[in-house]
Amino acid sequence: MYGRRKTGRRRGKYDCKNIANIMKTLAYRGFIFKQTSKPF
């Protein structure tokens, strides 16, 4: 997805790394993130 390779086969921290990399790529391309829920 988005030219990135998955890092590892296990879930958990690898999933977090993958999601962070996708979000970083989207932000670099100009995507604006919006909060969709109330803060804690």
Image (cartoon, rainbow, N blue to C red):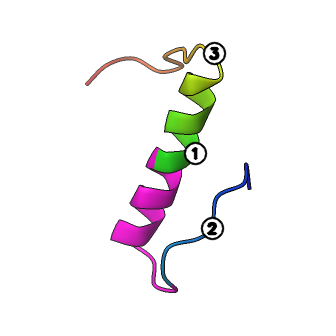
Name the kind of residue labelled 2 in the image. Arg
Q: Residues within 10 Å of mark 1 (few under 14, many from 20)?
A: some
Quick one: label 3 or label 2, which is nearer the N terminus? 2
Circle 2 packing at 10 Å, graded few (<14), some (14-19), many (20+), is few
Query: Would you say the magenta stretch is mainly helix, strand or loop?
Result: helix
For marks 3 and 1, the one nearer the N-term is 1
Task: Name the secondary structure under disc 1.
Answer: helix
Residue 39 in the image, given as x and y percentages of width and height: 31, 19
Mark 3–mark 2 Cα distance, whole angstroms, equals 21 Å
The reply to whether discs 3 and 2 touch (Cβ–Cβ < 8 Å) is no
For the view shown, which residue lies furthest in the bottom direction? 9
- Distance from disc 1 to disc 2, alpha carbons, whole Å, reads 10 Å
Where is residue 26? Give x, y as percent.
62, 31
Instruction: Name the residue located 48 percent from the left edge and 81 percent from the top edge.
Output: 8
Check disc 2 and report the residue beneath it. 5
The residue located at (51%, 58%) in the rendering is 18
Quadrant of image for the C terminus: top left
The residues bearing labels 3 and 1 have C-alpha atoms spaced at a distance of: 13 Å
Secondary structure under the numbered disc 3 in the rendered image:
loop
Please give the residue where the numbered disc 1 appears in the rendered image. Answer: 22
Q: Position of residue 37 (x, y in %)?
A: 47, 21
Q: Residue at x 72, y 54 (%)?
A: 3
**Labelled disc at residue 30:** 3
- Decide: marks 3, 1 in contact (CB < 8 A)? no
Q: Residues within 10 Å of mark 3 (few under 14, many from 20)?
A: few
Please tell me which residue is depicted at 39% across the width and 17% down the height of the picture: 38
User: Label 1 sits on what residue type?
Assistant: Ile
Q: Decide if residue 22 is on the left or right side of residue 8.
A: right
Does residue 40 appear left or right of residue 31 in this picture? left
Write the start and end of the magenta stretch as one range. 9-20
* Quarter of the view holding residue 36: top right
Report if residue 21 lies within the magenta region.
no
